[in-house]
Image (cartoon, rainbow, N blue to C red):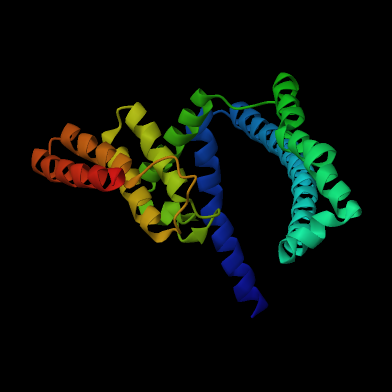
Amino acid sequence: MFGRRQGSAITQISKLLPICFLICSLAIGCTNSEVYTALAEMEELLETESVLITNLEGYLKVQQQKLDYLNSKLGEYQREHEDAAADMSAYVSNPINAYLLTKRLTTDWRQVENLMAHDVGVEFLNNITNYRHILKFPSDEDLNGAAVALMRLQDTYKLDTSSVARGMLNGIQYSTAMSSDDCFELGRQSYVNHDYYHTVLWMSEAMTRLQEEPQNQTQTFTRADILEYLAFSTYKQGNQEIKANLYKVVATAQKQKLH
């Protein structure tokens, strides 16, 4: 039993090794020294991400403290106001209540206003600016290169787009699944490179995932955006009939977006 399991594990590893090497070699070349250099650079990026995570955690902690304080003041004001609303004349005729109400609307409220106006994120944004001088950050060209390497990997191994989006390579769960945003960016990078074939593949996958995911208010693209990329890329591949149909869908989607 153990022997069969061990054999199965070795088989899986043997499937992964050429893929791992291909990812590196497609991204930066074929020599061992270049592969090791690329891997070292990727490790530097992980270190950069670690620092950014710590910085974001600090920001969220301070932001939460600010929100907790404001929430406690809100509860305090609401309780006092409800007491006063029960019998306004009796409440304001009490000199203590009169003083406390006046204080709440002067010095207390100024403190709340100052805290609301204070942007706790400035310090943490400054940290990121400083980090850019000492940590390694990838460029837009690096992003494009990584996308191209993934496209080449997909073509070389004839990998199904949906499987790659799920993080599956040769039947092995190789990474976490991609979101609609991840797929959209792959499609956009392909479009920038005039690679309309992969633009259609990844924009179609982005559409599928967008429909499956819960609605996200911070989404930077819409269904209409995806359809526009699909229409133009399909046309560039010579299929004008599909292009015409897609543009009709785009127009409908844009009208729905406006209403």
| Coordinates of residue 182 in the picture (x, y in percent) | 46, 44
Q: Nearer the viewer, residue 54 or 60?
A: 60
- In-image side of 38 versus 194 (left or right): right
| Coordinates of residue 139 in the picture (x, y in percent) | 55, 24
Which image quadrant for residue 203?
top left
Looking at the image, can residue 257 be seen?
yes
Residue under the image location 44 percent in, 55 percent down: 215
Determine the residue located farthest toward the right in the rendered image: 96
Residue under the image location 36 percent in, 44 percent down: 222
Looking at the image, can residue 201 be seen?
no
- In-image side of 92 versus 27 (left or right): right
Determine the residue located farthest toward the bottom in the rendered image: 1
| Coordinates of residue 225 in the picture (x, y in percent) | 32, 39
Residue under the image location 39 percent in, 48 percent down: 157
Total count of labels: 0
| Coordinates of residue 78 in the picture (x, y in percent) | 73, 58
Q: Identify the image quadrant of the N terminus.
A: bottom right
Determine the residue located farthest toward the top in the rendered image: 133
Residue under the image location 21 percent in, 39 percent down: 231
Q: Nearer the viewer, residue 29 or 57?
A: 57
Q: Nearer the viewer, residue 70 or 212?
A: 70
- In-image side of 6 versus 242 (left or right): right
